[in-house]
Amino acid sequence: MSEHSNNTMVELIKVSKTYHPNIQALSGVSISIRSGEMVFITGRSGAGKTTFLKLLCKMELPTRGLVEIDGLDIRKMRGNNLSYLRQQIGVAYQDFKLLTDRTVSENISIAMEVSYRKPQIIRKRVKALLEELDLSDKHNSMTGDLSRGEQQRVTLARAVANSPKLILVDEPTGNLDATTTARVMEMLIGLNNSGATVLIATHDHTIYRDVEHRLLELRGGQMHQLRDGVMQ
Ligand SMILES: Nc1ncnc2c1ncn2[C@@H]1O[C@H](COP(=O)(O)OP(=O)(O)OP(=O)(O)O)[C@@H](O)[C@H]1O
Ligand SMILES: [Mg+2]
């Protein structure tokens, strides 16, 4: 992203997040994630997984501490810098945030238009993503009419459409059966193999049980490393 890019994509130093009135979601989290890593973040409901991801895309600001993405302090990012950052980060939200009165392909295309891609390139990309996620027959469906599992995959397609360098996914498989889960994971692993840094917040142990990627757990507001990762 930045011209001075080193090998660290995400750096948190002593980060705390307190929500009003006095909910301490994160307390003194320090973690460094290298460019090209794939990392699973687990932890009980309410442990702060979503909060952690929101800090990385500046949807929330830390109460204390430093958050750097690709060497840049998110607090100092404004204007062009901030929109550039947002273009380089793809986020699949836990609550989807889809435009429910728009079609599946519109939801993905709109996300791509901000990157000024040509209409025919957008159409091709949308088609390929929907095929990959087994959603081809939903191309023209309103996202509000889809099942939760289908909405979840549209959210993922939208997050990765612009081939971002940093992909944040929040519970990507919560509503999916085993076969569809495997398909989603295949996509994320493929993107990671092509160089994207991928962070996945999840309760679903089946998706991290049999892989060798790094595994973190949020507990008591702090980050614990349960497993080292090997770079794939
Ligand atoms: N906007 C907010 N205002 C107040 N409290 C919040 C807010 N967002 C999150 N919290 C609280 O912060 C804590 C961490 O929430 P967070 O959503 O990050 O957890 P999580 O690990 O993602 O949980 P889940 O597994 O259920 O998605 C919880 O106690 C939650 O109630
Ligand atoms: Mg969450």
Image (cartoon, grey):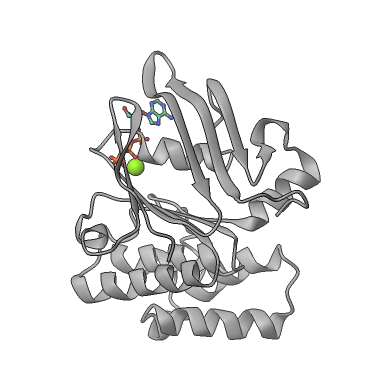
Return the x and y of residue 133 as percentages of the image width and height: 39, 77
Q: Nearer the viewer, residue 128 or 197?
A: 197
- Residue beneath the point at 28% across and 25% down: 220
Return the x and y of residue 24 as percentages of the image width and height: 37, 20
- Locate residue 123: give its quadrant: bottom right
Number of numbered tags placed on the structure image: 0
Q: Nearer the viewer, residue 37 or 100?
A: 37
- Residue beneath the point at 53% across and 72% down: 194
Quarter of the figure that contains the C terminus = bottom left
- Residue beneath the point at 74% across and 79% down: 118
Rendering quadrant holding ligand 2: top left
Q: Nearer the viewer, residue 107 or 211?
A: 211
**Is residue 147 something one can see in this rendering?**
no
Return the x and y of residue 47 as percentages of the image width and height: 30, 33
Q: Nearer the viewer, residue 180 or 12?
A: 12
**Is residue 62 something one can see in this rendering?**
yes
